[in-house]
Amino acid sequence: MPIAVFRARASVAIGGGHVSRCLALADELRSLGWTCGFAVNAETRGVFPHLERSGHDILDLAGDGADDPNALRDRWSGHVDWLVVDDYAIDRAYEAACRPWARRILVVDDLANRKHECEVLIDHNPGRAPEHYAGLTPVGCELLLGPAYALLRSQFAATRDSRRPPNGRAGRPILVSIGATDPGNITLRVLNALESAGYRRPVEVVLGHAFPHRRQVADAATSLGFPVTLHHDVEDMCRLLSRCGLAIGAAGISALERCCLGVPTLMVVSADNQRLAARELERAGAVSMIGDVGGLGDEALADRIRRFIDDGERLTEMARAAERICDGRGARRAAMAVVPAFAKDGGRVTLRPATMADADTILAWQQDSETRRFARNPEAPAKGEHRAWMENKLNDPACVMNIVLHTGSPSGALRMDGLQKIAKGPYDYEISIYVAPGKYRLGIGTAALELGRRLLPRATFVAHVLADNEASHVMFRKAGYVRQDGRYVNRPKTPAAAVGTVNGRMPIANA
């Protein structure tokens, strides 16, 4: 059974986001049949108690970390398939020391300030680009950049897919969530600012297990002019976010959780490494910056909040902008780098989100005579028409548009269009897929359909195939689609069946 080991850290100073995002990836790998272990210190276990209940193997680390590689090797004897590192204190030296024991290394980073020794690097920050890691990663390192790769727990994508569009935000409770530990007690300042702003509706406050000002906040909450509910060690953040109309919160992974569920945010910046993401989220219209609260007076903070709490139109616009940024499927995309599918020639097949930079490539594929011959509309689109269509698709939260990669090269497109239903119907997404000219008959399409199922594991898919398109009939049948009423249908797999083979190969990276 393949093994992944996670080296991550949480503390009162940095919060629990590093362990939270690693746990999301570990859970995804476990669903694919992997065994996962965590190597953490005692403070991490204290700050992030959810790890104890995760069911993953845990190794307690001691000392200053210098002997960690030996401790990890001794615990998981032999070799592990992947080592996943998420710790600001770790760089290339530590990672290289693990090389004799770890076949491959994945790094989760959001600073882009030190060199790494790894095959894959994930940085979910909005605005992050390959040039930020120039000279910091080895040649050939696969960079998974941007919010599409945010490592959120699977509940976020599931909640997003089942909820209604984000509207009617005004009048609903406000959520206050300033990270797992909030050492500066910004939480209390925000509550006092809401009081000064004349706010009188309910407030939901999220406090982490190691929040150091718990008693002070609890005492203050009893004297405020609005009802306050304190939530400790929240496990179902999705439910809490879904009922709130506005969040006042920090940047980091929690900001992308809010984006995923379309919750507008008044954003607090509490650390320098949050500034890039905060600026990009504000530029996209998903958040409005409060800024560095430490440099903001109490009345200025209250005035900033007062201008937002009842502006329903602006909150709805921000909510719609937010949900375009992150779809909650980042852990599944990251798992494809660890557990790819394989074409008939043994080449790795993965998916990445399409962007407008792919528009000309997709247009060339669509204008190819072989592709056009089996399209529902036989007329090839003009460039302007195509770009407008693609921009519309990319801005539609109900559309999941992917580029299919074969050995790292763009080799096709897989699009899942959410079907707008007035009443609950039998299908959730319509599948459209085509393989690039020159890449036919390699099994790339079949592998891509399997990855599409992994990306949307709970959806029911429907596909329309022209009668004389024999290659597509074969492809869909191989991918487990069943012909019904002139269409191909694929329903969710049972959990036991979700772990299997792709094109006859076990889906492990070193196969």
Image (cartoon, rainbow, N blue to C red):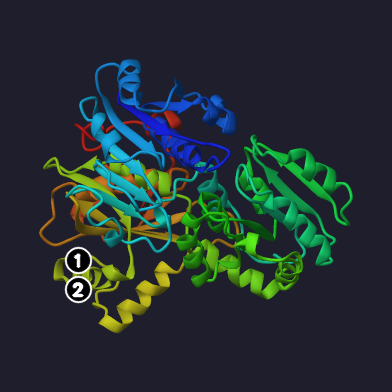
Q: Are marks 2 and 1 in contact (CB under 8 Å)?
A: yes
Identify the image quadrant of the C terminus: top left
Image x and y of residue 305, in percent: 72, 67
Q: Nearer the viewer, residue 39 or 292?
A: 292
Residue 401's mark? none
Task: Report the residue marked by disc 2.
Answer: 367
Instruction: Say few, some or many: other residues with alpha carbon within 10 Å of mark 1 (under 14 / 14 to 19 / 20 or more).
Output: some
Q: Residue at x 65, y 66 (%)?
A: 167
Can residue 482 be seen in this snapshot? no
**Is 169 situated above or below 502?**
below
Instruction: Say few, some or many: other residues with alpha carbon within 10 Å of mark 2 (under 14 / 14 to 19 / 20 or more).
Output: some
Task: Report the residue marked by disc 1.
Answer: 371
Q: Quadrant of residue 171?
A: bottom right
Q: Residue at x 14, y 42 (%)?
A: 344
Q: Nearer the viewer, residue 451 or 194?
A: 194
Q: Nearer the viewer, residue 284 or 272?
A: 272
Alpha-carbon distance for marks 2 and 1?
Answer: 7 Å
Image x and y of residue 112, in percent: 35, 53
Can residue 395 be seen in this snapshot? yes
Q: How many marks?
A: 2
- Amino acid on which disc 1 is placed: Thr
Q: Quadrant of residue 105?
A: top left
Mark 2 secondary-structure assignment: helix
**Is 71 situated above or below 382?**
above
- As drawn, is 37 to the left or to the right of 364? right
- Amino acid on which disc 2 is placed: Gln
